[in-house]
Amino acid sequence: MIFHELHLAGAYRIELQLIADQRGAFARRFCAETFRARGLESDFVQRSVSYNRHAGTLRGMHFQAPPHLEAKLVRCTRGAIFDVIVDLRDGSPTYGRWHGEELSAENRSMLYIPKGFAHGFQSLVNDVEVDYEITPAYFADAGAGFRFDDPALEINWPLSDVIVSERDKALPPSAIGIKL
């Protein structure tokens, strides 16, 4: 695995190192020891998958409130997404800043999202599958978020035609004032 530190403190894009031969390829996509050596969460206790039928489907911006803050390892296993994280950590030098990048089945990159970040994504094509590893397990009463179109953040979502759930439409309009 090749770790690329992002401009948001503690967040990483992780590339797989493929070992290829005539049969195909093999790569390690997680190693607890490697994660711990970098000071990253390594006790992922829940694995989830998201299926998205249509391009433009937007999920986010979501996080879990204290004391149930989540770290996530996210990858796209079918299709492509524009994945976005927002630093909401109180006192962080990158508080209130966002980062977005394409994750796809083709590029096989993953995003490591530390505790204290909001997360969302937009499907870029039809029939997208996204795989998450999460710690700690989801706690429904701690689920929170803000709208994907927060005017203060000005996130540049690639597709203007969006499909958003009623739940996400009802989220607070802004991240301003949220500190985890």
Image (cartoon, rainbow, N blue to C red):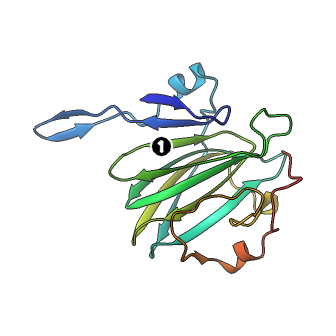
Is 123 rendered above or below residue 91?
below
Position in image of residue 35 (x %, y %)? 55, 27
Furthest residue to the right?
177
Tell me the kind of residue under disc 1.
Met
Count residues near mark 1 (Cα–Cα under 10 Å), then give few for <14, some for 14-19, many for 20+: many
Q: Residue at x 73, y 67 (%)?
A: 147
The residue sitting at the left extreme is 22
Report the residue at 42% width, 43% height from top: 109
Q: Residue at x 58, y 69 (%)?
A: 58
Residue assigned mark 1:
110
Toward which corner of the image does residue 121 lie, by quadrant?
A: bottom right
Please, what secondary structure does the residue beneath circle 1 have?
Answer: strand
Quadrant of the frame with the N terminus: top left
Q: Quadrant of the C terminus?
A: top right
Q: Position of residue 165 (x, y in %)?
A: 64, 77
Could you tell me which residue is drawn at 73 percent across and 56 percent down? Answer: 153
Quick one: 176 or 134, which is closer to the camera? Answer: 176
Q: Give x and y (percent) for residue 64.
A: 76, 53
- Location of residue 36 (image quadrant): top right
Taking the image as shown, residue 63 lies to the left or right of residue 83, namely right
Is 61 above or below relative to 58? above
Residues 169 and 93: in front is 93
Residue 85 horizontal/vertical position (percent): 64, 49
